Amino acid sequence: MSENAAHQAQANGGAKADRGIFSPRLDDFLDRLQEGQTPNSGTFCSFCYNPLTTGATRCDHCGQVLADRPAINSVPRDVVEMHRRMRKRESLIVNSFAFFGLGLGLALFLGLVAINVLYLNRELWFFFIAIIVFLVGSRVLAGVIGGVIGDEIGYNYGHKKLAEDWRLHLATRESDRHGD
Ligand SMILES: [Zn+2]
C-alpha cells in the first residue's frame, strides 16, 4: 500500500516530477523505436516501462521490486503512442516559434527596405545590407526563438500533456489489474 502511495506521489508530483515520468533510457528507447532503429522488445519495468539492465532485482527509475511485479518484454502500444504524441507536440511548438523568428527577420528586412526607399534614395549598398541582415537575422532569430524559447515551452507543454496521458494510462491499467 505504501509502495502504491509512493508511485502515486511520483505520478502526481509537481512539474519537476512530471519530467521524470519516463526514464531517460525509456525516452531514448522510444525515440529509437519511433525511428525504426529498434524492435519493441527487451526487458522493461512493468510499472514505469524503464528498460532494465540484466540481473536487476529492482527498477532503477521507479524503485519497483521485480519479484512483486515481474518485468515485461515490450512497451505497451498505448505508451508508445503517448510518447509519439509528446514528441509531436514538442516539435509543433518549436517549429511554430522558429517560423515566428523567420517572420521577424522578414519584417526587419522589409523595414530596412522601407527606410531605404523613403529616406535613403534607394541606395544599392543599403539594399545589400538589408539582404545580409535578413539572411543572417532570420536564421539567428529562428534559432534563438525556436531553439531556445520554443524548445523550453515545447518541452514543458509536451511533458505536461504526457503527465495527463500517463495518469489516465495508470488509472485504466491499475483498475484493469485490480479487476482481474
Ligand atoms: Zn520502474
Image: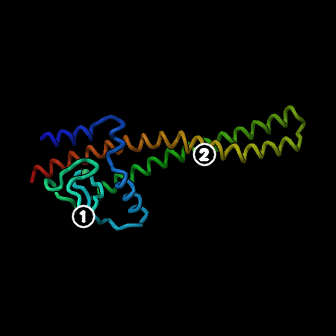
| Marking on residue 90 | none
Image quarter hosting the N terminus: top left
Placement of 84 over or under 138, stated as above or below: below
Image quarter hosting the C terminus: bottom left
Residue 5 occupies which quadrant of the picture? Answer: top left
Residue at image coords 15%, 47%: 175
Its colouring scheme is: rainbow
| Lower sequence index among marks 1 and 2 | 1
| Marking on residue 143 | 2
Placement of 48 over or under 2, stated as above or below: below
Which amino acid is tagged 2?
A: Gly
Residue at image coords 44%, 47%: 89
The residue carrying pointer 2 sits among few (fewer than 14), some (14 to 19) or many (20 or more) residues within 10 Å by Cα, namely: some
Placement of 38 over or under 27, stated as above or below: below
Q: Is residue 11 left or right of residue 112?
A: left
Which of the pair 44/112 is nearer the observer? 44
Q: Is residue 4 left or right of residue 51?
A: left
Residue designated by label 1: 73
Separation (CA) of disc 1 from disc 2:
40 Å
Beta carbon of the mark 2 residue lies under 8 A of ligand 1: no
Q: Secondary structure at mark 1?
A: loop
Q: Position of residue 47 (x, y in %)?
A: 22, 51
